[in-house]
Amino acid sequence: MGLLSRKSLFCLFLMTSILLILSWFLVLRSTAPSHSFDLSILPNSNLLAMAENENLDMSSIKAASLHEEHKNARKCDTNKQILKVFMYDLPPQFHFSLLGWKNKGRRIWPDIRAEVPEYPGGLNLQHSVEYWLTLDLLNSEFSKDLSGRSAIRVRNSSEADVVFVPFFASISYNRYSKVKPNQKSKKSVDDLLQEKLVSFLITREEWKRSGGKDHIIVAHHPNSLLYARMKLWPAMFILADFGRYPPTVANVEKDVIAPYKHLIRSYVDDKSDFGSRPVLLYFQGAIYRKDGGIIRQELYYMLKDEKDVHFSFGSIKGDGINKASEGMQMSKFCLNIAGDTPSSNRLFDAIASHCVPVIISDEIELPFEDILDYSEFCIFVRMSDALKENFLINFIRNIGKEEWTKMWRRLKEVEHFFEFHHPSKENDAVQMIWKTVHRKVPMVKREIHKEKRLSRMIGRGERGLNVASVPRNFW
C-alpha cells in the first residue's frame, strides 16, 4: 500500500508539471505571433530543446545562438582591452608646475576641462610623451564613452594592472638640470626631484608589493632620469631608445619604446606622387655628431654632390621647421641616420610627410614593432653597407615607382599611430602606448608571482630595493 501511495503521488506530480508547462506555452502563443519568440532572452542551453518542442527551424536557432556567443565575446574583449592604471597624486612640482602652471590653493592637478597647460615648444616637444599620457589618464575620469580608449585611471591601487608615476622627466632635464649661479644648493632642481622621487617610491606599499615591477616611469629624453634610473630599474620604462641604458636597467623585453612627437607639420590631403616629388633623398639636421653619429659626416661627403640629393646642415631656429616640412614633402625618400643615440625625431617627421624613411641605424628599436611591420613603409640599410662607395645611392635609385607608391600608401595608413592628441583618439600614439603596456602586463604579473615563491623565507628588508626613509620636508 505504501508503494502504491508513493507511485500515485509521483504520477500526480508528473501530470501537474506537464499541465503547467503546456499552459505556459499556450500563454506565449496567445500573446505573440506564431513562432516569434525573442530568442535573446533565453539561455543558449535551452534553445535547442525549445526548437524540438516547437518544430522551429534549427538553422535559425543555431544562428541566433552563435550571434549571442559572438556578442558576449565582444563584450568580454572590450572589457579586457581596458588597462586599469593607478596614478600617484604627486605634488605639482613633479609635473605641471615644471611647465609653469600655478596651482591655486592646494590643487594637485589642473582642471583640464577648463584649462590645459601648454607644453613648451621647440625641441622640448619631441620628448613630451609623459605629458600626453598624464592628460589622458586625467581625462579618463571625465569621459563616459570608453570606445577607442585603452586605459582608465582607477583610485584603488589594488584594482590596478599598473601604477603610473607622473614625473615629467624630460622637461625636468631640459629646463632644470643645470645649477643656477645664485642657487644655494649645489644640486640642480632636476637632481633634487629625482632624489625625492626615489625616496617616495621605495617606501610606498604599491612599490613594495611588486618590487616596482608594475610601475610605469616615462624617461623619453635620453639624458632624463640619469640618477633615478639606476635606483628604479625594476620599473617599466617608456623610452625613445636604449642607447644610453645598460641592458640590465632597460631592455626590449621589459620596457616600452614610444614614438617622438614629430615637429614638422603633417601632410594633410597629400595628392603627391612619385613624379611630383623631385628630390630623391633628403636629410637636414646636425651632421657632426659623436658616438654612433659619426656616420652622418661620412655619408655627407659621399652624397653632397649628387644632383637630386638634399643633404645639409639644419636646425629648428628661424624658419627651420617650415623649410624641413617643405623639403620632406618634396622628397621621395628621407634619411634617418643614427645620431648620438640610435633613434631620432627625423623618422617620425618623415612618416608625417609621407616621405619613405631610409633607416641607417643598426641598434634602433621601433615603437609598436610587435604589431607593425616597418618593412612595408621603410627601407633598412646596414651601416656597413651604407658606407660602401656608391652603395646607398645606387640602392635608392633602383627602387621604382611601383614599389615606392606601395610604401607611400602604407605610410598614409599608419601615420595616425604616431600622432599625439588631447583628447586622445582611437589608435593614436597615446592609445598605442597604453596597448603596448597592456601587452606586457601578463609578463609583469608572472615575474611578481615568481618572486613571491620564497617571500615567506626572505626578510622584508631584503625584497626589492633597500628601503630608505622619506625626508620630512618631501612635501
Image (tube, rainbow, N blue to C red):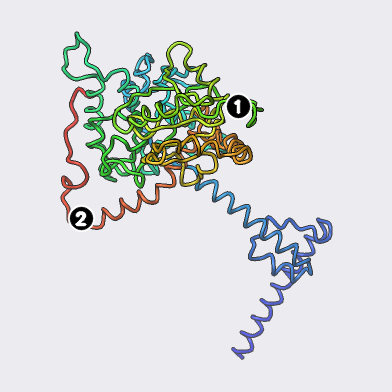
Picture coordinates of residue 17, whole percent (x, y):
69, 72
Residue at mark 1 to residue at mark 2: CA–CA distance? 67 Å
| Of 141 and 399, the residue lying toward us | 399
Q: Secondary structure at mark 2?
A: helix
Asked whether residue 203 appears in the rendered view, the answer is: no
Residue drawn at point x = 59 percent, y = 34 percent = 412
In the image, residue 362 sits, relative to residue 352, either above or below, namely below
Residue drawn at point x = 78 percent, y = 66 percent = 57
Left/right of residue 136 with respect to residue 75 in the rendered view:
left
> Which residue does the numbered mark 1 point to in the structure image?
277
Residue drawn at point x = 29 percent, y = 31 percent = 291
> Which residue does the numbered mark 2 point to in the structure image?
456
User: Dividing the image into 4 quarters, which one contains the N terminus?
Assistant: bottom right
Nearer the N terminus, badge 1 or badge 2? 1
Picture coordinates of residue 188, whole percent (x, y):
22, 19
Location of residue 472 (image quadrant): top left
Do labels 1 and 2 touch, CB within 8 Å?
Answer: no
- Three-letter amino acid code at the position of disc 2: Arg
